[in-house]
Image (cartoon, rainbow, N blue to C red):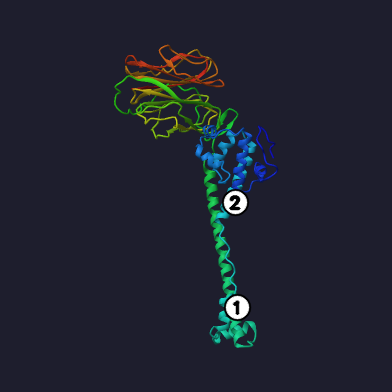
């Protein structure tokens, strides 16, 4: 039982206190009560804060923490909540074991058929004994052979009916046992099949220190060279007004082990504008990055680079968006990583993306550039660069670039987002100085 703190009253020894110990939990209500006590011990963080750190909607969190419902949340959501509430890895394993034990008990209770009572002579049997027709000769012979001499007509009829009821009860019991055995064998076969399927699936990445251990292997073995990305398909028509940066409606940087995040929109986004997302994942695993929002706008990756230390930088865009308000959010899903840094910037005057290029370099140098493979830019367009760095000094793009504030910083890791308008048609690149390890993604828009 945890001692009360922070002015929170904890009941004297009762099931709510015991429910905090996973080994004492036996029902979904115990589990939900334990999660609620964990939240109290963590200082009762608001549901909005828990939603941001876990990616679980606030409405779902309110259901999870409601003791009146007593519904067991999914195991994936349990892991996300336990991490957000500061539960250690050994304790998380105990909570997972309690979840599996309770879930198994719930399934067994739901799937076990009710036992059928044995048939016994009742009023109907008595009626047959008293008033039913006299047994024929064959029935009399069987009765006499099994029970001895018949002492009277009524006694003979009663013995025959009782014997038939006993046989029918035995037959029902045998059928019930056979049905139960068949059901148990079917459930066991299904569970064994699911276990084999789960065993054949690749295990999820796990964190070791500051790095995600990825299986199967597929990580870059050395520094990457600059390479042009495939030109994304353009969308819409050429805008009537020049491109311009409008604002940054959302951004975040966290040290977390979850694989999804929901960013609340802090300033409204206008209809028809473009949202460009720049993102850095630290010590990450290969895999897709997905973006959605509460207005169902369509996002696609424009540029993507992973350096030799498995730090990944991306540029993602959505054009001609339906407007977003402060009640909306942008949701991202990504592979396991030790940190994420993400910024959402709003631009006007854009209708599509043209080309992309990426590059990366080791620490200790004095410059970074994507110019090894220059892009061909068109006058009047827009260039957006995302530069992710680790250690060393902050990257400083050349003077014709505008850095969007704030530069997102976690420990020694920085994500710098910058843009510039293309003045003339010709080769273009993002170039600047830094002594840090770096990865840069550049994309052009019209």
Q: Label for residue 367?
A: none
Position of the C terminus, as image quadrant, is: top left
Q: Earlier in the sequence, mark 2 or mark 1?
A: 2
Residue at image x 68%, y 36%?
A: 4
Instruction: Give the image location of residue 149, x and y in percent.
Output: 64, 87
Q: Quadrant of residue 50?
A: top right
Instruction: Give the image location of residue 34, x and y in percent.
Output: 62, 41
Instruction: Give the image location of residue 332, x and y in percent.
Output: 47, 32
Provide the residue designation for mark 2: 105
Q: Gap between marks 2 and 1, in whole Å?
A: 40 Å
Give whichever of 396, 351 is nearer the camera. Answer: 351
Position of the N terminus, as image quadrant, is: top right
Residue at image x 65%, y 43%?
A: 16
Instruction: Give the image location of residue 440, x and y in percent.
Output: 45, 21
- Disc 1, SS: helix
Q: Is residue 378 rendered to the left or right of residue 366?
A: left
Provide the residue designation for mark 1: 162
Give whichever of 375, 38 is nearer the camera. Answer: 38
Rendered view: 142 above or below 79: below
Give whichever of 198, 151 is nearer the camera. Answer: 151
């Amino acid at each position: 039982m945890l001692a009360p703190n922070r002015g929170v009253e904890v009941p004297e020894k009762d099931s709510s206190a015991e429910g905090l110990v996973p080994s004492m939990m036996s029902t979904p209500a115990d589990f939900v009560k334990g999660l609620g006590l964990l939240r109290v011990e963590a200082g009762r963080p608001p549901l909005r804060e828990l939603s941001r750190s876990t990616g679980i909607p606030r409405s779902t969190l309110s259901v999870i923490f409601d003791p009146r419902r007593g519904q067991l949340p999914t195991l994936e959501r349990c892991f996300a909540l336990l991490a957000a509430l500061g539960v250690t890895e050994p304790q998380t394993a105990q909570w997972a074991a309690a979840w599996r034990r309770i879930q198994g008990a719930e399934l067994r209770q739901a799937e076990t058929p009710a036992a059928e009572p044995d048939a016994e002579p009742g009023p109907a049997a008595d009626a047959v004994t008293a008033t039913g027709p006299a047994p024929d000769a064959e029935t009399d012979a069987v009765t006499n052979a099994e029970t001895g001499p018949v002492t009277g007509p009524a006694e003979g009829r009663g013995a025959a009916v009782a014997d038939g009821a006993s046989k029918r009860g035995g037959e029902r019991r045998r059928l019930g046992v056979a049905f139960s055995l068949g059901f148990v064998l079917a459930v066991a076969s299904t569970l064994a099949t699911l276990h084999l399927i789960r065993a054949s699936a690749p295990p999820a990445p796990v964190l070791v220190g500051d790095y995600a251990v990825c299986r199967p292997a597929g990580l870059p073995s050395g520094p990457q060279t600059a390479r042009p990305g495939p030109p994304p398909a353009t969308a819409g028509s050429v805008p009537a007004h020049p491109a311009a940066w409008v604002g940054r409606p959302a951004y975040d940087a966290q040290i977390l082990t979850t694989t999804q995040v929901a960013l609340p929109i802090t300033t409204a986004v206008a209809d028809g504008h473009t949202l460009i997302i720049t993102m850095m994942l630290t010590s990450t695993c290969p895999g897709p990055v997905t973006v959605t929002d509460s207005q169902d706008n369509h996002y696609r990756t424009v540029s993507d680079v992973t350096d030799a230390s498995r730090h990944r930088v991306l540029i993602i865009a959505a054009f001609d968006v339906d407007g977003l308000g402060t009640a909306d959010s942008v949701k991202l899903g990504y592979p396991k990583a030790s940190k994420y840094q993400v910024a959402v910037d709003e631009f006007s005057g854009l209708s599509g993306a043209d080309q992309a290029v990426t590059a990366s370099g080791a620490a200790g140098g004095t410059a970074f550039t994507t110019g090894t493979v220059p892009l061909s830019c068109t006058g009047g367009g827009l260039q957006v660069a995302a530069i992710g760095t680790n250690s060393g000094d902050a990257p400083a793009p050349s003077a014709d670039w505008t850095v969007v504030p704030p530069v997102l910083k976690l420990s020694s890791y920085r994500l710098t987002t910058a843009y510039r308008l293309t003045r003339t048609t010709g080769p273009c690149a993002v170039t600047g100085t830094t002594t840090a390890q770096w990865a840069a993604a550049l994309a052009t828009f019209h």
